[in-house]
Image: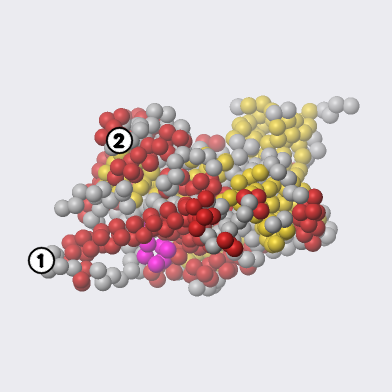
Amino acid sequence: MEEVSGQVVKAPFGTGSKSEHDAVYLNTDKGRFVLRRPGANAFSDPELETLVGKKIQGRGKVVGYTFFLSDWNELTNEK
Amino acid sequence: MATKVDKAILTNIGALKTKYKDTGVAKIQKALDALVASDKSRGLVTTIVALDDAAAMRKLSAPRVTDAKDPEQNKKAVDGVFKALAPDYLLLLGAIDVIPHQDLQNPMYDPSGEDLDQFAYGDLPYACEAPFSQQPQDFLGPTRVVGRLPDLTGGTDPSYLVGLLETAQSYKTSPTSHYLDYFGIGAEIWQKSTSLSVTHVFGGPASLNTVPPNSDKWPSSKLSKMSHFINCHGAETSAQFNGQPSSGARVYPVALDAAYSDGKVTEGTVAAAECCYGGQLYDPSLIGQIGICNTYLGNKAYAFFASTTIAYGPAASNGQADLICQYFLQSVLRGASLGRAALQARQNFVRAASPPDPSDIKTLAQFNLYGDPSITPVAIPSSVAEAAPKGLSKAMAFVAAERVEREDRRKALFRFGLNLAMTEPRPRRTQVKPTKSVDTVLRNRARELGMTPGTILSFDVVHPRALATALPKQMRVRKATENRFHVVFGSQEKPQTKERGSVVDVTAMIAKEVDGEVVSVSKIVSR
């Protein structure tokens, strides 16, 4: 289990490819990860959509460029 | 009696023991022995080579593998075995934690978010004479028949792999009609492209189903067809493929689900999947579900031909993934073994793409055959036995004659592969940016195609020296930099609609530059 925190954003993924979609990303100090929940639709996950724009601390597993999120909590945005 | 090895099964016993312990490996060994015996009854001389066995590899004058995860060691070991035995079939036994895919650098890689695959993993280099390299451009001339029977990555129960070996051992050929009756699934947004593909392979789009309006709950009457053609979205480490409406709305209903399909796929199924990551051999423990590729094979499918990484293709025509999948299935339907079909698909793809652009190179590198390459699913009537010498039984005469025929086919494919390797021009990524005038044209053409141009990747087209000197003067390229490819990534704003909201469609444009002029552009649209 790894802990990663950062800003959740939505941005294009896989331009011109067969997996092109607007993905939910986590921008972190270690780089940008595609956010996914195990078992959820890889292309549109309403649960993750609600996190867009928020800062979170996530727990899960990093696989390549994907962070499989099993649990998270929202962080208060710094003023 | 000829002693030449027809089929070499390559594995790594140490890696298998790490996963399955001695008792598990003993079960796998028993299933392998049965496969070797079955192959013998079909007229194939099969041998098993452990790439990590020092004595066995020494006997073949081949370097052994000391680190199962090392792609370079594995490439050199496979090359050594092939050089020693020249088998008609190379079967890689095990998933990527037994024999790794080669980690070829992805020419489309763009860490800014357009194509996040640093590597286009695959087995292509194992099928080529070219020595180890991470440049996929070095492997444009495949010559060898290669397939992989993957166990579960990270697996601990040998029964899955034993099951795959039993399927290979007991396989049966069927009439062409069984494989012409196909099951097609396509994302609705790519209906035109998929219709073309299935028409080219099967003669018509009547059995093509799109998602939406369909869902992934396919009736057994469809899932049980023996040919599957799938053109959907796919994601990294996912057990599902996804559709998308023709409106372009950003909704992705599930089109095929591994868990739902389990138990419904028929023995002997041959599937080609264009989807991104359709052939990724991920560790199922990561998401608690084995992938679609492994599910099909576990259900006794004979073959799954698919991509390890992000795949490309146009929306309304055919290119890249569409073509390589079509070529594979077309060869299978003409009676080729699975491995020959995969080799011919690769060779025909290189020939058709010439000169291949960076997305073509990635396509070639990422598609793999999962299945025993010696399986021949479709029975084509043969007159070979009727011309056999007297004194041999009809069955023996057929086997002997077929062996000679196969050797001739292999030599022809080898020559063709070598020819491709020696003559095909190849794109090489360059940090030299387009000239100001070309940059302006690229951005203008992208805008004309409705795109907002973003990152541009540039590639020189390098012509092999031997070809350059053989060509007539007027056909020669005077400088290596005269021909270039440019990949323009971009986004396209679509008008806001009630159901879609504000949608951003993203596309890529591939442009060809000759003598400083942009002479053609093609658009790889959203899949």
Q: Secondary structure at mark 1?
A: loop
Q: Nearer the viewer, residue B194 or B269?
A: B194
Q: Residue, x 78% and y 57% (percent of image)? A: B441
Residue B239 percent location from the top left of the image: 55, 47
Callout 1: 10 Å neighbours few (<14), some, many (20+)? Answer: few
Which amino acid does the dot numbered 2 rest on?
Ser
Residue B273 percent location from the top left of the image: 52, 56
Callout 2: 10 Å neighbours few (<14), some, many (20+)? Answer: some
Q: Secondary structure at mark 2?
A: loop
Q: Which residue is mark 1?
A: B391
Label 2 marks a residue whose chain is B
Image side of residue B179 versus residue B29, left or right = right
Q: CA distance from mark 1 to mark 2?
A: 39 Å
User: Which numbered disc covers residue B61?
Assistant: 2
Q: Residue, x 82% and y 28% (percent of image)? A: A76
Quarter of the image that includes the C terminus of chain B: bottom right
Residue B496 percent location from the top left of the image: 83, 58
| Mark with earlier residue (1, 2) | 2
Residue B148 against residue B186 in the figure, above or below = above
Q: Nearer the viewer, residue B78 or B467?
A: B467
Q: Nearer the viewer, residue B521 or B432?
A: B432
Q: Any magenta on residue B184?
A: no
Residue at the outermost right position: A79
Residue at the outermost left position: B391
Label 1 marks a residue whose chain is B
| Among the 4 quarters of the image, the one containing residue B392 | bottom left
Q: Residue, x 33% and y 35% (percent of image)? A: B62
Which span is picked out in magenta?
Answer: B331-337
Q: Do tags 1 and 2 sit on the same chain?
A: yes
Image side of residue B138 versus residue B435, left or right = left
Residue B524 percent location from the top left of the image: 67, 58
